[in-house]
Image: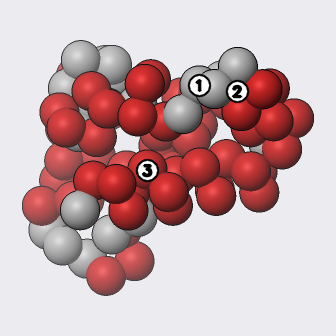
Amino acid sequence: GLQAVFRVFRLLLLYHDPNLCNYLDQYDMVPELYASSWFITLHANRLPVATLLRLWDALLLDRHEDRLLHLFVSLGLLIK
């Protein structure tokens, strides 16, 4: 479940921004500590409403290519 999502998210972070990933690892900042609310609420507390609604539409329509979209949105928020 959610633990698998955190593992995939960390791997994506390692691939896209290894310096940030290593920095967070150095201080034992695992995704469970900073990204739990993102994944549990699907970003309801983090994104502007218009963006949030577009994300939810993509996720709720269950288009195959969008199944990992929330992970990439999370990655973008963290790297930004």
N-terminal-most mark, 1 or 3:
3
Task: Work out which residue is located at the far right of the displayed protein and give it.
Answer: 19
Q: Amino acid at mark 3?
A: Phe
The image quarter in which residue 42 lies? top left
Q: Which residue is mark 1?
A: 29
N-terminal-most mark, 2 or 3:
3
Q: Is residue 37 above or below residue 65?
A: above
Q: Amino acid at mark 2?
A: Leu
N-terminal-most mark, 1 or 2:
2
Residue 6 locus on image (x, y percent): 43, 50
Q: Which residue is mark 3?
A: 6
Judge by depth and name the residue closer to the eye, 49 or 79.
79
- At a point 24% along the width and 17% down the height, the residue shown is 45
Q: Is residue 79 visible?
A: yes
Which disc, if any, is residue 24? Answer: 2
The answer to the question of whether label 1 and label 2 lie on touching residues, with beta carbons closer than 8 A, is: yes
CA separation in Å, label 1 and label 2:
5 Å
Q: Is residue 22 left or right of residue 75?
A: right
- At a point 87% along the width and 35% down the height, the residue shown is 19
Judged from the image, the secondary structure of the residue bearing numbered disc 3 is helix
Which disc, if any, is residue 58? Answer: none
